[in-house]
Every structure is written in structure tokens, then in C-alpha cells.
């Protein structure tokens, strides 16, 4: 996944506060590779560099929704913990928490306005 950001260092600081790490092999002044898991990576690209990959205009994530980026947590407590870290690092609340018993989520907007949803699902309810 590639996301445009206004200020790379500011975004790196924000996501570092949430506990994410970055691959220095794929990092320079225009981009960085944020490690979400062993299988999931997010490239944070400075807007000018991001524009080299598309002919379309970059959506203003502060006023338009381009996507809602969802990541899973291992527990309800982890959902709340990541949400609190995000707000503490400067994010804004996006929606009220959603609690459907078997699924719990909280959402926030990062510093560039991208929407993130952190979700926990009770996997034992799907085992048969």
C-alpha cells in the first residue's frame, strides 16, 4: 500500500509513537517503508514523489475519503492501546467505538487525514 504524506519525518514520528518500525533499506528523503506485520508494509511517500506514480490528483484526505485502512489487533485492549497512542501522537478521533460483541473497533485520522480502523474479532466464535 502506498500513502501520500505531506511531511515524511512528521509521519515517521507519528507512526513510531504507535509502535511501528521502518525498513531503512527502503527509506530516503522521499519515502519510507513502514512495517505493519511480516506480510504487510505501507510505503509513506512524500506527495511530490507519490505524484510520479499516477496521473490523477491526490485526494485531500482531510476533506475526502480515499480509503479506510483497517488493521487487526489481538485483543480489545490492544485496539484501545493503539487508539490511545494514535491520539497521543496527534491523531483525531474518526468515529465512536463500535462494539458488536464478537467484533470491536476504534478509528482515527492520522496527521494527513488518512482514516485508520483498528479491529479485534473473536476468532473463537468462528471455530467450529
Image (cartoon, rainbow, N blue to C red):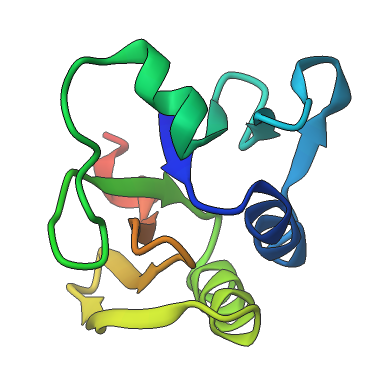
Residue 13: quadrant of the picture:
bottom right
Q: Give coordinates of residue 69: x percent, y percent.
A: 33, 46
Q: Give coordinates of residue 24: x percent, y percent.
A: 86, 25
Q: Is residue 29 visible?
A: yes
What residue is drawn where x is 50% and y is 24%? Answer: 49
Residue 126: quadrant of the picture:
top left
In the image: residue 105, left or right of residue 86: left
Q: Give coordinates of residue 90: x percent, y percent.
A: 57, 81
What residue is drawn where x is 35% and y is 83%? Answer: 93
Dividing the image into 4 quarters, which one contains the C terminus? top left
Residue 114: quadrant of the picture:
bottom left
Q: In this figure, what is the number of numbered marks?
A: 0
Q: Is residue 1 visible?
A: no
Q: Is residue 66 above or below residue 91?
A: above
In the image: residue 107, left or right of residue 65: right
What residue is drawn where x is 65% and y is 78%? Answer: 89
Amino acid at each position: 500500500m502506498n500513502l501520500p504524506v505531506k511531511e515524511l519525518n512528521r509521519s515517521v514520528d507519528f507512526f513510531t509513537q504507535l509502535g511501528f518500525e521502518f525498513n531503512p533499506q527502503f527509506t530516503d528523503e522521499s519515502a519510507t517503508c513502514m512495517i505493519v506485520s511480516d506480510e504487510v508494509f505501507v510505503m509513506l511517500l512524500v506527495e511530490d514523489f507519490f505524484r510520479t506514480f499516477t496521473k490523477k490528483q491526490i485526494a485531500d484526505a482531510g476533506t475526502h475519503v480515499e480509503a479506510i485502512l483497517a488493521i487487526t489487533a489481538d485483543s480489545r485492549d490492544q485496539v484501545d492501546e493503539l487508539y490511545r497512542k494514535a491520539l497521543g501522537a496527534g491523531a483525531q478521533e474518526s468515529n465512536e467505538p463500535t462494539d458488536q460483541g464478537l467484533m470491536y473497533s476504534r478509528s482515527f485520522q492520522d496527521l494527513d487525514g488518512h482514516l485508520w480502523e483498528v479491529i479485534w474479532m473473536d476468532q473463537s466464535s468462528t471455530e467450529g
